[in-house]
Image (cartoon, coloured by chain):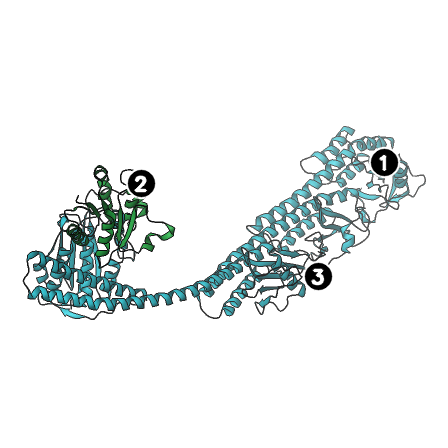
C-alpha cells in the first residue's frame, strides 16, 4: 500500500476503521507496514511499531518487529536494528496499556508515548508502540483501542493473502516445470532450477533471507544440500548442515534461522532452511515461519512425484532397452544356432551377448556373469552337501564377480529359483561389503543349464532388475534347450541320411536287377509277335504281356529315379535327337500299351493324333528317350486310372515357337484349379482321387516333373471341369 | 453240385486269368467278379439270397470306378482308406448273420504280418493266401474250403 495522503482535517474514527479494513480486503493487498502507518496517522503519532511477542517456550526470546512506520518528515526506520524499549516490554509483560514513567524513553529517535497489547487471531501476541507525539492523548488512546479491536483479523487476512500469493507463485513455477517436462521427466539439474525459483520467491517474501534446500532420493539416503534461492544463487552439492540435524529441523523461530521439513505423507524428503540475510540481526516471526510450511509441502509433493515419475521413466527406458537388447540377442542366438563351429565358441558368444544386454539394461550392476553346468550332468541335490561344479562361461565379464555372488549363483542353480540378496540382508556373505546380488537359474522346464548372477552397489537392486535377469535367463535357457535339441536332431539327421542313402542304393540296385530281365522279356515278346502268326486272343495276350513288361520297366525306372532324388541328386539324362517319326513311334507304342492294359469293360480309347506329331517337320527335340517314355507312360497311366468309362484319351503334339509340346487330354475325376500348384509335389494326391479310387502314392507327376526339368523342359496342367490336359513341354533343338 | 465263387478284384489283368483257372479247375463253377468295394457292398443283398461257396477277396481295393456320379464313400471307408478295404469286406461278411459261414480267402500281394499288424487277427471266417506266381496254392486252399 502506498503512503496514505496527509490531510489537515482529521477524519472520523469510522473512516480509519474502514481504511484499516481495506488494507486487508481491498483489491490491492496491503501489508502490515501499511497497518502500522495507518495506526500512526490515526492516532496522530510520529511513529508506530508493531511487535510480535516471543512464544512462551522461548525463554530468552525477544519481541520481534512486525512493521515500523515513521512520519515521512523523519529518517526511515531500520527494522532490523530495532529493539523493544522499556514501555513496550512492560505492555507485553503486563498485557495492558503502558506509559513511560520517565522522560527519555525513545524508539526510532522518537519519544515513546505509550504501548498497547494486542492479541493476534492465530494465538500469538504482540504490542503496538506509539511514539513521537509527546504524550498519549485520550483521543489517541481511544482511536488506538478501537483500531486494535479489528487489527488481529486484519493481520490474519493480510498474512493469509500473502501466504496464498506465495503459494500461487510457487505453484505457477512448478506448473511451468510440468509443462517443460514433456514426455520425460526433467533432469535433476533442471528441476533444481525451478526449485531455485520457488526459493527465490520465498526469499523475497522473507526480506531476502537465504534459503537452503536439502533433499534426498530415498529414506535411507543422506540428505544432499542445495543452497538454492540464496542471494548469490549458488548451488552446492555438499550438505551445508549436518544432515542428521537437518533431518530433524528445529521448529523454533530465532535469529539463527528457521526450517521446515519436506514431508509428504509418511515420507520426509528433506528440509527447507531459511537464514536471515547477511547484516545486522533480523528476526523470523511466527507469521513468517508459517510461510515456510505450505512451500515445503509443495516442494515435498513435487519432489516425490518427480522421483516416482523418474523411476517409472527409467523403468520404462530399461524395458525399452531390454526389448532392443533382446532383439539383437535373439539375432545372435539365431546366428549361433544356424552357424556351425565349436559348441563352446557359440555358447561363449551367446553368453557374451546376454551379458552385454544385462549391463546395458541394468547399468547399476557392476559385475555380471553366467555359469554353465557341465553338459549331460544335470544338477541334483544329493543331500550330502555336495555342490555342483559349474564351469565358468562368459570370460571377460566375470573377472570382477565376488565369491558371494558366485556362491549365490550355485544356490540359485540348485534350487532353480531366483535368489536376491540385499546389502542389508543377513544373507549377505563375507564377500559382500554392501550392495545387492541377484542370481537367476537358467532353465527350461526341469532342465537347468546354469545360472546368471549380477551384483551392484546400493541397498536394493534396481526396480526391474530381477525381471530383466529372469527374461535373459529364460532366453539363455531357450538357447541351451534349442542348441541341445538341434545337436540331437543333427545326429538323427545324419543317421537318417545314412539310412536313406543305403536304402536308395539298395533300390537302385533292385532297379538294375529288375530292368534287365524286363527289357529282355519285352524284346523277346516283341520278337515272337513279329515272327509268328497267332489267333487274335493269343495275339492280345502276347501284346498284353509285352505291355506289362514295359509298364514294369517303367515302374522299375521310377524306383531308380525316386532313389536318385531321395539322395538329393537329379536324374542325369543321356540325350539324343528325336524327330517326328521317332516321337510318333514312341507315342503310339505307349498308347497301344495303355489300350491293351486298360480294362476292356470300361471302353476307354487311347489315340494318338499322328498329324499333329508330323507338325514337328524336320526339326528335332533333344531328349533322353527313356526319360520321355517314362513321362508319357506315367501320364497315360494316370489318364487310365482317373478317366471315366467310355471316354477317349488323346495324345497330341504341337510346335509353339521354340518349344515342342506333347499333350495328354482326358476326361474324368476333376482336378480343382486350386490344386493345380500342388500336383507336382511329392506324395500329393487330389481329394477326389483319394476318395474314389484310393490307389496311387502321389509320386508319378513328381518324378515326371524332375525328369522334364533334367531335360530342360517342364510340365503344365490345364484343368477345365472334368477335362484335364497335361503338357510335356520341351525346347526344340 | 458246381460251386459258386465270388471274386472281388479291381485289377482286370488278374481277375480274368483267375476266373479262367477257377472254371477250369472246378468244372461247371459259377464265378461272379466284382471290381470295387462299392460293388461288393451292393452285391451283399444278392449274396444273402444265394450265398456263394467261397469269396475270394483282394485286400487293396478301390472304393469305386471313376464315373461322373460316383457314390461317395461312407465314413468308415473314408476313414479306413484303400489299403485295408478287403479286410473291411471280410468283416462285413463275418458280421452278417446269413453270410458269416461263407469261407473267405484274402488273396493279396501283402504279407500276412501286414494284415495282422497291431495285433489284429484276421476275421474268423477268413484264410490268407499270398499272390505269387504259383496259383496252385490258391486252388488247393479253395478246394479245402469248399469240400
Task: State the image coordinates of residue A564 (x, y, percent, origin top left).
Answer: 29, 66
Chain depicted in green: B
Tag 1 subunit: A
Quarter that holds the C terminus of chain A: bottom left
Please name the color used to draw chain A: cyan
Nearer the camera: disc 3 or disc 2: 2
Q: On screen, A363 above or below A675?
A: below
Q: On screen, A585 above or below A687?
A: below
Task: State the image coordinates of residue B142 (x, y, percent, origin top left).
Answer: 23, 50
Q: Does residue A479 appear to the left or right of B76 in the view shown?
A: right
Nearer the camera: disc 3 or disc 1: 3
Instruction: Please give the label number shown on residue A429.
Output: 3
Tell me which numbered mark, 3 or 1, is placed earlier along the sequence.
1
| Mark 1 crowd level (few <14, some 14–19, many ≥20, 10 Å Cα) | many
Instruction: Identify the residue shown where x is 75% and y is 57%.
Output: A240
Circles 2 and 1: CB distance less than 8 Å? no
Q: Marks 3 and 1, Cα distance to the nearest angstrom?
A: 68 Å
Residue closest to the eye, A607 or A78: A607
Residue closest to the eye, A374 or A350: A374
| Residue furthest right as drawn | A102
Q: On screen, A234 above or below A80?
A: below
Quarter that holds the N terminus of chain A: top right
Q: Marks 2 and 1, Cα distance to the nearest angstrom?
A: 124 Å
| Mark 2 crowd level (few <14, some 14–19, many ≥20, 10 Å Cα) | few
Q: Marks 3 and 2, Cα distance to the nearest angstrom?
A: 79 Å
Q: Which residue is mark 2?
A: B95
Q: Which residue is mark 1?
A: A117
Amino acid at each position: 500500500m502506498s503512503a496514505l495522503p496527509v490531510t489537515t482535517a482529521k477524519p472520523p474514527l469510522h473512516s480509519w476503521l474502514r481504511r484499516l479494513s481495506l488494507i486487508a480486503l481491498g483489491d490491492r493487498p496491503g501489508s502490515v507496514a501499511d497497518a502500522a502507518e495507518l495506526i500512526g496517522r490515526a492516532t496522530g503519532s510520529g511513529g508506530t511499531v508493531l511487535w510480535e511477542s516471543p512464544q512462551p517456550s522461548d525463554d530468552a526470546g525477544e519481541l520481534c518487529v512486525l512493521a515500523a512506520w515513521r512520519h515521512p518528515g523523519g529518517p526511515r526506520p531500520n527494522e532490523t536494528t530495532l529493539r523493544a524499549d522499556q514501555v513496550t516490554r512492560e505492555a507485553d509483560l503486563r498485557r495492558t496499556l503502558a506509559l513511560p514513567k520517565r522522560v527519555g524513553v525513545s524508539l526510532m529517535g522518537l519519544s515513546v508515548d505509550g504501548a498497547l497489547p494486542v492479541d493476534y487471531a492465530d494465538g500469538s501476541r504482540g504490542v503496538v508502540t506509539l511514539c513521537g507525539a509527546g504524550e498519549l492523548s485520550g483521543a489517541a488512546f481511544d482511536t488506538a483501542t478501537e483500531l486494535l479491536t479489528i487489527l488481529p483479523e486484519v493481520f490474519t487476512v493480510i498474512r493469509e493473502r500473502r501466504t496464498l500469493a506465495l503459494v500461487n507463485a510457487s505453484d505457477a513455477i512448478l506448473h511451468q516445470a510440468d509443462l517443460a517436462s514433456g514426455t520425460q521427466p526433467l533432469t535433476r539439474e533442471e528441476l533444481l532450477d525451478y526449485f531455485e525459483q520457488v526459493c527465490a520467491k520465498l526469499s523475497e517474501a522473507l526480506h531476502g533471507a537465504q534459503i537452503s534446500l536439502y533433499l534426498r532420493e530415498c529414506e535411507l539416503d543422506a540428505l544432499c544440500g542445495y543452497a538454492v534461492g540464496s542471494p548469490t544463487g549458488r548451488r552446492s552439492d555438499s550438505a551445508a548442515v549436518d544432515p542428521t540435524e537437518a533431518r530433524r529441523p528445529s521448529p523454533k523461530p530465532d535469529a539463527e534461522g528457521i526450517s521446515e521439513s519436506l514431508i509428504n505423507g509418511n515420507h520426509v524428503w528433506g528440509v527447507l532452511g531459511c537464514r536471515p540475510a547477511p547484516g545486522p540481526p533480523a528476526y523470523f516471526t511466527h507469521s513468517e515461519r508459517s510461510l515456510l510450511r505450505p512451500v515445503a509441502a509443495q516442494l515435498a509433493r513435487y519432489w516425490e512425484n518427480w522421483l516416482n515419475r523418474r523411476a517409472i521413466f527409467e523403468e520404462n527406458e530399461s524395458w525399452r532397452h531390454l526389448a532392443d537388447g533382446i532383439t539383437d540377442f535373439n539375432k545372435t542366438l539365431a546366428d549361433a544356432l544356424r552357424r556351425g563351429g565349436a559348441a563352446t565358441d557359440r555358447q561363449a558368444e551367446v553368453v557374451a551377448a546376454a551379458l552385454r544386454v544385462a549391463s546395458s539394461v541394468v547399468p547399476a550392476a557392476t559385475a555380471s556373469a553366467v555359469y554353465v553346468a557341465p553338459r549331460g550332468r544335470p544338477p541334483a541335490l544329493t543331500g550330502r552337501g555336495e555342490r555342483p561344479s559349474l564351469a565358468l562361461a562368459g570370460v571377460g565379464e566375470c573377472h570382477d564377480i565376488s565369491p558371494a555372488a558366485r556362491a549365490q549363483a550355485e544356490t540359485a542353480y540348485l534350487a532353480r529359483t531366483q535368489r536376491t540378496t540385499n546389502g542389508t540382508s543377513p544373507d549377505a556373505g563375507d564377500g559382500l561389503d554392501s550392495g545387492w546380488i541377484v542370481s537367476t537359474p537358467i532353465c527350461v522346464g526341469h532342465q537347468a543349464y546354469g545360472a546368471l548372477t549380477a551384483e551392484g552397489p546400493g541397498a536394493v537392486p534396481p526396480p526391474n532388475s530381477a525381471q530383466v535377469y529372469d527374461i535373459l535367463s529364460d532366453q539363455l535357457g531357450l538357447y541351451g534347450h534349442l542348441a541341445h535339441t538341434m545337436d540331437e536332431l543333427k545326429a538323427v539327421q545324419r543317421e537318417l541320411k545314412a539310412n536313406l542313402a543305403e536304402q536308395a542304393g539298395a533300390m537302385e540296385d533292385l532297379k538294375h536287377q529288375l530292368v534287365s530281365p524286363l527289357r529282355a522279356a519285352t524284346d523277346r515278346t516283341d520278337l515272337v509277335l513279329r515272327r509268328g502268326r497267332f489267333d487274335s486272343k493269343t495275339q492280345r495276350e502276347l501284346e498284353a504281356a509285352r505291355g506289362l513288361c514295359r509298364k514294369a520297366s517303367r515302374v522299375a525306372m521310377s524306383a531308380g529315379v525316386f532313389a536318385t532324388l531321395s539322395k538329393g541328386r537329379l536324374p542325369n539324362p543321356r540325350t539324343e535327337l528325336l524327330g517326328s517319326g521317332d516321337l510318333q513311334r514312341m507315342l503310339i507304342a505307349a498308347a497301344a500299351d495303355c489300350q491293351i492294359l486298360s480294362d476292356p469293360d470300361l471302353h476307354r480309347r487311347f489315340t494318338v493324333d499322328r498329324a499333329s506329331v508330323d507338325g514337328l517337320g524336320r526339326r528335332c527335340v533333344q531328349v533322353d528317350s527313356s526319360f520321355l517314355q517314362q513321362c508319357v507312360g506315367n501320364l497315360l497311366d494316370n489318364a487310365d486310372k482317373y478317366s471315366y468309362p467310355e471316354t477317349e484319351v488323346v495324345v497330341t503334339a504341337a510346335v509353339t515357337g521354340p518349344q515342342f509340346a506333347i499333350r495328354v487330354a482326358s476326361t474324368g475325376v476333376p482336378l480343382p484349379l486350386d490344386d493345380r500348384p500342388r500336383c507336382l509335389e511329392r506324395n500329393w494326391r487330389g481329394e477326389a482321387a483319394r476318395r474314389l479310387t484310393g490307389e496311387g502314392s502321389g509320386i508319378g507327376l513328381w518324378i515326371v516333373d524332375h525328369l522334364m526339368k533334367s531335360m530342360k523342359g517342364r510340365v503344365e496342367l490345364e484343368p477345365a471341369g472334368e477335362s484335364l490336359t497335361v503338357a510335356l513341354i520341351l525346347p526344340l533343338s | 453240385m458246381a460251386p459258386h465263387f465270388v471274386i472281388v478284384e479291381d485289377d482286370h489283368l488278374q481277375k480274368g486269368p483267375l476266373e479262367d483257372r477257377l472254371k477250369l479247375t472246378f468244372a461247371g463253377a459259377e464265378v461272379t467278379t466284382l471290381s470295387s468295394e462299392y460293388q461288393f457292398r451292393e452285391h451283399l443283398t444278392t449274396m444273402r439270397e444265394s450265398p456263394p461257396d467261397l469269396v475270394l477277396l483282394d485286400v487293396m481295393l478301390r472304393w469305386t470306378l471313376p464315373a461322373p456320379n460316383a457314390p461317395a464313400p461312407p465314413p468308415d471307408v473314408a476313414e479306413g482308406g484303400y489299403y485295408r478295404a478287403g479286410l473291411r469286406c471280410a468283416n462285413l461278411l463275418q458280421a452278417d448273420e446269413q453270410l458269416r459261414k461263407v469261407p473267405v480267402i484274402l488273396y493279396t500281394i501283402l504279407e500276412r504280418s501286414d494284415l495282422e499288424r497291431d495285433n489284429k487277427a484276421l476275421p474268423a471266417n477268413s484264410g490268407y493266401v499270398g499272390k505269387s506266381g504259383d496259383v496252385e496254392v490258391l486252388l488247393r486252399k479253395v478246394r479245402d474250403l469248399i469240400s
